[in-house]
Amino acid sequence: MRVRLPVRKAILQRKTYEAPAEGRLNKMRLDFNENTSGCGPAALRALRKLTAQQVAMYPEYAGPTRRIAAYFGLAEQELLLTNGGDDALRVFFDAFVEPSSRVLICEPTFPMYRYYAEIAGARIETLRYGSEMEFPLDEFVSALRKKTAVAFIANPNNPTGTLLPPASIQKILLAATNTVVVIDEAYAEFSGVTVLPWIRKYPNLFVTRTFSKAAGLAGLRLGAAMACRESLALLRRAMPPFPVNIGALVAAEAAVQERTAIRNYVKQTREIREWFAGELARLGVKTFPSTGNFLLADFGSQGPSLFKKLDAQGILVRERSKDIGPGFVRISIGTGSEMKRLVKVIQRELQIIQKEPRPKPRRERN
């Protein structure tokens, strides 16, 4: 029997998102900016205390939302919990983007902005970070004048590590009088910079966060969207009644109540990141200033060979040849021992690559 399904044109015109490769558990996972130390002990204890009855019930959100909101210095009505940071981004399209609405992003950046925009059938206006991964502020402000529905800015940006200072964000907010401005602060714990207190001043400002990075809860999927009460109420209309599972709720509550584990991880990650950048510089590898738990590096012509060798040894990194160029890679900052091992492997493999004979260029026949 032949069946013709009424699939939307926007779905047919895009490729399926490629999820992380399987079999990553026992490898050195420096490819998806995860907390390779694992979550804190308080989160694990909270998960172990879950009863069969709790698991069998639909979650209750009022208490966890109130306590997690307090962690961010917010009222309960200013916080919306979501099924991971990705879901926090999706709801903006459900609430504010019509087919053919204009969405503004600056690439290279987190691919889910484009992913959801394509599914929504939006018109995507794309700017580019500069050669030194600087944000094109003036061009971004100018683009806002074109009846933009939603503008997305990752701050710090993934994969460049670029941090847009608050003064620049304020300039954008003042220009975006008819635009929803989403500041994605997935890595704010590492940068120490946030515009979250501004949500009460700018009704068009929305801030998103995730518990996947600093809190180490990527496997449980918990994110959040934050805005003033009136603006966030519009997002709530686009959300299902039970978006977050009970495991994510109890683990996140425990994590924010025991902040020491998060603070220690952030401090260690910053220190290791700076050490690692210095080691790559010593090896002649160009890196870009980062305020996240990752580093963007350019290995040049040696990059593709090196990345294959790392993969063969169970070391996973995020190659960025498709959106930045051959030789570019984003490397998550793991534990001290992981990064020391990585430096040794990189140094050894680069020496081997440099000694390998290069193929002679083919001579063209006349």
Image (spheres, helix red, strand yellow):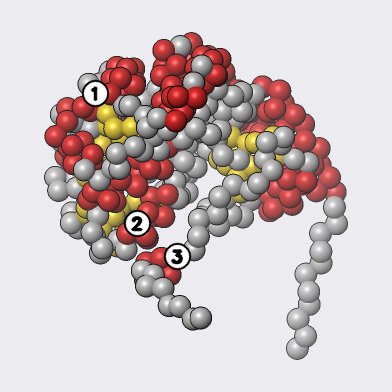
Neighbours of disc 3 within 10 Å: few (<14), some (14-19), many (20+): few
Going from N to C along the chain, the mark reached first, 1 or 3, is 3
Residue on which the image places disc 1: 76
Residue type, mark 2 in image: Ala
Camera-near label (1 vs 3) is 1
Contact, mark 2 vs mark 1 (Cβ under 8 Å) = no
- Residue found 34% across the figure and 47% down from its top: 90
Q: Tell me where residue 288 appears, x and y as whole percent.
A: 53, 38
Residue farthest bottom in this picture: 366
Q: Secondary structure at mark 1?
A: helix
Q: Tell me where residue 267 appears, x and y as whole percent.
A: 52, 17
Q: Tell me where residue 193 appears, x and y as whole percent.
A: 36, 25
Please state which of residues 271 and 57 is positioned toward the viewer in this rendering. 57
| Residue 158 in sight | yes
Going from N to C along the chain, the mark reached first, 2 or 1, is 1
Looking at the rendering, which quadrant does residue 121 occupy? bottom left
Is 356 displayed left or right of 53 in the figure?
A: right
Q: Name the disc covering residue 117, or none.
A: 2
Camera-near label (2 vs 1) is 1
From this view, report whether residue 321 is shown above or below residue 344. Answer: below
Q: CA distance from mark 2 to mark 3?
A: 11 Å
Q: CA distance from mark 2 to mark 1?
A: 29 Å
Please state which of residues 352 and 150 is positioned toward the viewer in this rendering. 150
Residue on which the image places disc 3: 14
Q: CA distance from mark 1 to mark 3?
A: 37 Å
